[in-house]
Image: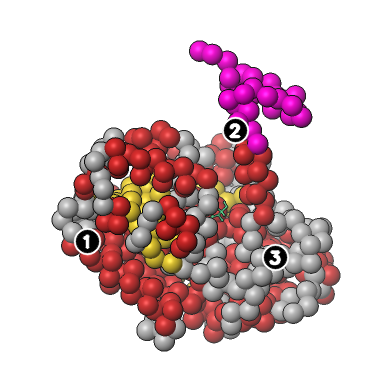
Amino acid sequence: MSLVRCDQTDAWKNLRTHFDGSARDFDARHAFIADPARFDTLSQEAPHLFADLSKNRIDAEAETLLLQLARECGLEARRDAMLAGEAINSTEGRAVQHTRLREPGTDDSEVASVRQAMLAYAEQVRGDLHITDIVNIGIGGSDLGPQMAVLALEEFRAPAKRLHFVSNVDGHELAGVLAGLKAENTLFLVSSKTFTTIETMTNAQSAKAWFEAAGGRDIARHFAALTTNVEAAAEFGITTTFGFWDWVGGRYSMWSSIGLSLAIAIGAKAFEDLLAGANAMDAHFRTAPLERNLPVRLGLLDIWYRNFHGFTSRCVAPYAQALRRLPAYLQQLEMESNGKRVDLNGEPVPFSTSPVVWGEPGTNGQHAFFQMLHQGTDVVPLEFIAIRDAAHDLPGHHPKLLANALAQAQALLQGKQDEGGHKHFPGNRPSTFFVLEKLTPASLGALIALYEHRVFVSGAIWGINSFDQWGVELGKVLARDIEPRLETGDTTALDPSTAGLLARLRQPS
Ligand code: F6P
């Protein structure tokens, strides 16, 4: 498929003209007055959720031109190539097929048989009264997805199982978790696509040593590996292994056996519901016309904000404490996918790519960084995620939570002009508002798939490879070089700053 440079299309040039003409000064408040149907036009249903885009700085002309941009860049063909299993991850020569993992009743025997085995094992662990604590050892995509989802679906968790997540090579994390565990009641899940990641291997070795020191012998019962590198897991001494495939990217892997901790927490049926929710969003992405295709609309809005408005970041505020790890999950999803500076041909791109993605749950964020969102010098588009029905019955809390979400979006839009100086709010600060009826496995699956596809859309328009991550390699190599120097003190060929810091860190206490 030939690469169309987005900034050389007619649509891009027209978007530039439109932006420089009137769109730069677009005011959503005026747009609501001019167009009483704006909310209807710019909001929509998608599987398991509702999205309101109407408070964004976008008008009909920009939307039309962005859709034209999508067509000129061959977005539909790129989407179809991914869904058809073409090797679109060109720098690694791999297909990108996480959507295959969530196809229901698939006759894809390889996928179905691993899923069945993994879910049967999850049920077995759920029924094993001796196993009370499950420790997932993994990092990046082998940690963030399952951890985020286990927290999000706490309501569905088997009460007799405690889930722990250890990712950092900082031994304080593993030591802290191990301190509360008994070897005979613990199951370690070593989650690593490659089974070579230094943090995970170090934590896994230490966990194994702790287990054996505590008299544990039955590794087969107390350790399982989730990996594409079955041989390395066997070499490590783990015989209970659930595999997956190189066409599942690390940050897209929570649907694979990497999701085992989640499956143990919520059970096989609920895990299948999660897959079904994601699959419903996949079908929407595949079939909905571009103008009513939510991932497409969001991805195009991202282009509009990043490349024309020049907004450098996007904030995510889930008004749901259960979604507290969602911003961290989305950081990897978007910034590892689209934090690229060359196109598919390896040529530097002359436009900006991934924004910084950040956030915290509401209402907590309101008492921390929302000040900047309302009155700072930078405009930061904000994403609200609200859940209509609470899963608790404490009176008064949920209306206050929802009222705050609505009020913040309203305040960002309206601002406050009747006072000047310090009490002036400029308003017209853009936000998108998602509503889920309930936080369930299905709605969570749909929400995550929505974000995955939206990241795909902006990456496809930019013509970058959203599925590799070479940028994480250099630091790994240098860390291997530095580690022995902390012992020896050798600073040969180090820059003066690194040498100085190394010496400082070696100073005796
Ligand atoms: O940070 C780089 C990365 O390769 C991520 O893409 C991945 O999710 C993470 O490391 C963990 O990798 P693995 O699952 O192979 O241990």
Is 104 situated above or below 89? Answer: below
Mark 1 within 8 Å of ligand 1, using the beta carbon: no
- Residue highlighted by disc 3: 91
- The residue carrying pointer 2 sits among few (fewer than 14), some (14 to 19) or many (20 or more) residues within 10 Å by Cα, namely few
* Element type where label 3 sits in the image: loop
Is residue 452 shown left or right of residue 180?
A: right
- Residue highlighted by disc 2: 483
- x, y percentage for residue 457? 63, 69
Q: Earlier in the sequence, mark 3 or mark 2?
A: 3
- The residue carrying pointer 1 sits among few (fewer than 14), some (14 to 19) or many (20 or more) residues within 10 Å by Cα, namely many
- Asked whether residue 503 is drawn in magenta, I would say yes
* Element type where label 1 sits in the image: helix
User: Residue sitting at 37 percent across and 73 percent down?
Assistant: 115
User: Which three-letter amino acid code belongs to the residue tagged 2?
Assistant: Glu
- Judging depth in this view, the residue of 430 and 160 nearest the camera is 160
- Asked whether residue 370 is drawn in magenta, I would say no
Quarter, ligand 1: bottom right
User: Residue sitting at 22 percent across and 61 percent down?
Assistant: 126
- Residue highlighted by disc 1: 126
User: Residue sitting at 34 percent across and 68 percent down?
Assistant: 118
